[in-house]
Amino acid sequence: MHMKKGVRISKMGLIVPLIMAAVLCILAPDVMAQSGREGTYLQVGAAGGPGIGGQAAVIQSGRFLTRDLSLYLNAMPRLVGYAGSVQVSAGVGGSLRIANSIRVIFNRGDLNRDLDVGVRFGPGLNFVRDETRADANQRSSLFLEPFVRYVTPFRADRTLFIELAPHRPALRIGFWM
């Protein structure tokens, strides 16, 4: 069975995201230093769509921006009609904290919720059961992933996140710790 491969990005197509990431990494520490709500969190969650999997990330959160370093695992088992593959990806990127930025700019009270809009990019490896030589030659890929993340308190010591993105696993739900 033939599987649809991820979007291929040419070397020229990587220049803009790499420049954006470099600017974010250079500017983010200065912007985050102004924040009273900054912190580093471990983001851990279950994921699905298509397939099943999980995500683990280190999130450095500031008043206006986040910096993310993520690891994804996604399995598409034969049992549920997929070709039987496992994908492992790692991404680096960041996001703009929309609700918190508005709250700071307009001096609103603390709503304890946020909406992050960002982008990540990185390498991925896809392992297909009974793979052909062509599958093995196309095992690695690069991805560019825009994402939206909603963050809200769950309990006094936990923060719930829900994240949606086009890179599989597309829907991620879990906690910031």
Image: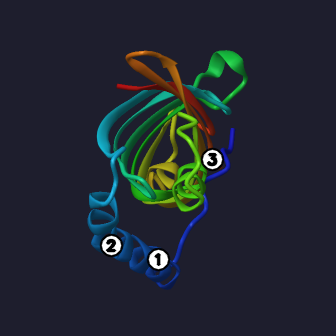
Tag nearer the camera, 2 or 1: 2
Instruction: Indicate whether 136 appears above or below 29.
Output: above
What is the spatial separation of the Cα atoms under label 1 and label 3, in whole angstroms? 19 Å
Please identify the residue farthest to the right as the structure is shown: 81
Residue picked out by circle 2:
27
Give the residue drawn at x 65%, y 15%.
79
Give the residue drawn at x 61%, y 53%.
5
Q: For this view, does 160 lie left or right of residue 122?
A: right
Q: Position of residue 40 (x, y in %)?
A: 28, 40
Residue picked out by circle 3:
165
The amino acid type of the residue labelled 3 equals Ala
The quarter of the rendered structure image containing the C terminus is top left
Residue picked out by circle 1:
14
- Crowdedness near tag 1: few (<14), some (14–19) or many (≥20) residues, C-alpha within 10 Å: some
What is the spatial separation of the Cα atoms under label 3 and label 2, in whole angstroms? 24 Å
Q: Position of residue 153 (x, y in %)?
A: 51, 24
Give the residue drawn at x 64%, y 32%.
83
Q: For this view, does 166 lie left or right of residue 143?
A: right
SS assignment at label 1: helix
Residue 168 seen in render: no
- Marks 2 and 1 in Cβ contact (< 8 Å): no
